[in-house]
Amino acid sequence: MKKVAIVGSQWGDEGKGKVVNYFSSDYEWIVRFSGGANAGHTIYYKGKKYVNHLLPSIDPGSNSKGFLGAGMVIDLEQLIKELKILENDFPGISSRFYIDMEAFLVLPWHKEEDELIESMRREPIGTTKRGIGPAYTDKVSREGIKLYHIFHEETLKQRLDDIYYLKNNIHNGKIKTNAEETYSYLIKLRKELDELKVNFASAVSMRDVFRSTSVLFEGAQGVLLDLDFGTYPFVTSGSCMAHGVSSVGFSTFELDEVYGVLKAYTTRVGEGPFPTELKDEDGEKIRNLGNEFGATTGRPRRTGWLDLPAMRYAKIRSGLTKIVITKADVLNGFDKVKICTAYDVEGKIKETPETSLDFVLAKPVYEELRGWKDTNDINFLKYLTFIEEKTGIKIEYISYGPKTEEMCTVNDMIMKIK
Ligand code: GDP
Ligand code: IMO
Ligand code: MG
């Protein structure tokens, strides 16, 4: 039974939600395995826009089910908000979602800490302020709360007391919430989840279920935001690569394909290196035509030309096997498009960055290609062929609009070329 992962191959917002939604009706399970509500995955289902921050992008009209894996950090209040939006349009849908009891929770103090630490950083990262860094930090420093804690009231009380004692010592009493409030808050959220009939499970109990059926893994963020191999320290705090499926008990060797979602140009939201960034009229034009404003924070996204060294890096780091290219329609009507083919790193030409430091030092080397009128124009096919030849990876699908159905295989597109 097919197991496929879909991950971002740039700095996030490549259109993963839309692509997952396109494939989702062919899979029994759609599994999110990392990140939290920093993600914003937009889908247009039957003409209506939904933005999933935590929920896997299942097809509401099929029988597919969603699983939130242990590698995630989950803000239960946000989760309930998303479930209620879906419940309104698809009553009963919450019972199609399962959450791993081992997942860590994002708690009120994490958002406070995210704000506080960002405000004190000399060089802010530009986080989404969704409490992601502090939640993963607590996980590593062993001060986290797992979902299962909220089902054992005595343990939960004790842990909250201990954690608040420590936090208040660290932050000199600056944390506004307290243990009692947070306890009542979590018990209230647990009751709401019960009322919605959400399921609680674990990768252990799901092991045989997942192996006997089809699973589509939905990555969050993108390779260049990965904690280990992204453009550190301007990264998120979790795994953004296909390897993250290990938190759901899978090995990447069990995956039939790892699709990298690649925007036809590049965007980044937040701070940090961005070799092909455009700070001119073309950049502004791409931002407006592509509606490049964050799905989570509404911030304008930084824009730039497509970056093939970054693509080659993503291919190696995340073991990508195929590409889905998105937002090609945004560049329709440009006379010429530039594409970065190599980096000049302190006088040395590199086709593939060797370390994430190379992104900081890189000066982009460009080639110019003719633009296309629409995605059925031969020049667009030449753009795709150029990318394939220069990166050694096949582009299998193209997305040419935000709606789920606005997608086809490259072969279908070739049949339509005028
Ligand atoms: P994700 O985080 O990777 O799921 O991407 P986001 O949802 O944050 O951002 C992608 C944006 O582009 C959303 O507004 C999508 O509706 C939109 N989108 C996705 N694919 C296409 C496409 O092929 N063309 C156009 N014009 N918009 C697209
Ligand atoms: P999706 O899944 C784009 C960025 C933030 C910031 C950095 C760290 O929608 O592609 P964090 O709040 O995670 O500590 O912020 O990472 N970032 C994203 N950028 N898409 C995302 O997710 C992102 N999630 C985090 O803007 O620069
Ligand atoms: Mg997004």
Image (cartoon, rainbow, N blue to C red):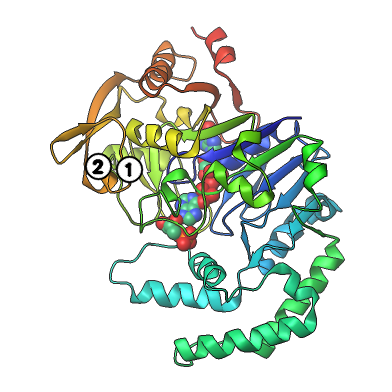
Left or right: residue 337 versus residue 95 is left
Task: Tell which of 348 and 249 is nearer to you.
Answer: 249
Residue 168 picture location, percent across and down:
51, 90
The x, y position of residue 23, in whole percent, is 68, 32
Residue 11 in percent (x, y) is at: 43, 46
> Is there CB contact under 8 Å for labels 1 and 2?
yes
> Residue 30, relative to residue 370: is it above or below?
below
Label 2: how many Cα within 10 Å (few below 14, some 14–19, many 20+) = few
Q: What residue do we see at 28% from left, 39% from top? A: 276
Residue that badge 1 annotates: 284
Q: Is residue 129 in view? A: yes
Q: Secondary structure at mark 2?
A: loop
Residue type at tag 1: Glu
Question: Where is mark 2, residue-wise?
Answer: 280
Q: Quadrant of the N terminus?
A: top right
Residue at 62% from the left image edge and 58% from the top image edge: 72
Q: Residue at left 46%, top 57%?
A: 236
Q: Amino acid at mark 2?
A: Asp
Image coordinates of residue 206 in percent, x first then y, are 80, 49
